Amino acid sequence: MGGSSPSVTYAPPPPAPTVTQQPTQSLESQTALNEVSGAQSRLNMTLGSQLDQQNKAFFTTQDMRQTQAVGGETRATIATQGEQQRLGTVTEGEQQRLGTRVTGEESRLGTVTTGEQQRLGTRVTGEEQRRGMITEGEQQRLGTRVTGEESRLGTVTAGEQQRLGTVTEGEQQRLGTRVTGEEQRRGTQTAGEETRKTDLQKIMQENYAANRNRNWAQGSYRA
């Protein structure tokens, strides 16, 4: 056990009785000596008992203090481990919620962008179709008018006007097809970029989770 033993102060022995030696009183002197010796023995026994009790109380207190210290350290260790586990759980939950929110935002952004591109493509296609129909109608009316004129003038001129109308219509159709293809490629490129951003987010989250778990394991091992 640690610590120093308590100091014990012994009471001084009682003074020896003054015995007057008288040749005629040897029995009385022996009796007095016996009484003094008995008193000294009883005093020594009392002091020894007191010393034993003090030693017992001291070492019992030391044992209790050591037990309390060990218990306190154990409780502190358990509390620290529990706090670290709760902190790890809270951090992991926050990262998961963050990842879910980012994924949702990316999905919504991708959906909005795709919808806008589709609407833009549909609008451009519709405009091109209307332009083509207007041009075609104008050409038809022009062709009809010229055809009537050329019918009067001759079949050769009517054939040339029909070929001119067919060439113009083909150019308008090719123009509409080219614009539609460009819009579709833009939509595909935007969707690919969003997918790569989402994959990068997932990789960053996985790396963060792996580093956090490794740090937590090292911290637990040190504890």
Image (spheres, rainbow, N blue to C red):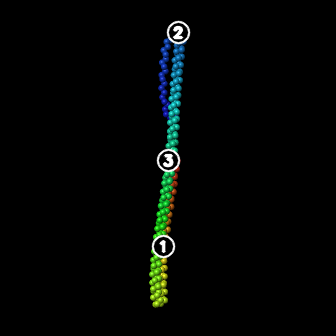
**Image location of residue 181, percent across then percent down:** 49, 72
Crowd band around label 3 with a 10 angstrom C-alpha radius: few (<14), some (14–19), many (20+): few
Crowd band around label 1 with a 10 angstrom C-alpha radius: few (<14), some (14–19), many (20+): some
Q: CA distance from mark 2 to mark 1?
A: 150 Å
Res 74 seen here: yes
Mark 3 or mark 2: which comes first in sequence?
A: 2
42 vs 112, nearest the viewer: 112
Q: Secondary structure at mark 3?
A: helix
- Name the residue located 45 percent from the left edge and 84 percent from the top edge: 142
**Residue topped by disc 2:** 24
- How many marks the image carries: the answer is 3
- Name the residue located 48 percent from the left edge and 82 percent from the top edge: 166
**Image location of residue 49, percent across then percent down:** 53, 26
Res 186 seen here: no
Question: What type is the residue that disc 3 sits on?
Answer: Glu
Question: What type is the residue that disc 2 sits on?
Answer: Thr
Question: What type is the residue that disc 1 sits on?
Answer: Thr
Mark 3 or mark 1: which comes first in sequence?
A: 3
> Height in image: 67 above or below 8?
below
Q: Secondary structure at mark 2?
A: loop
**Residue topped by disc 3:** 83
**Residue topped by disc 1:** 180
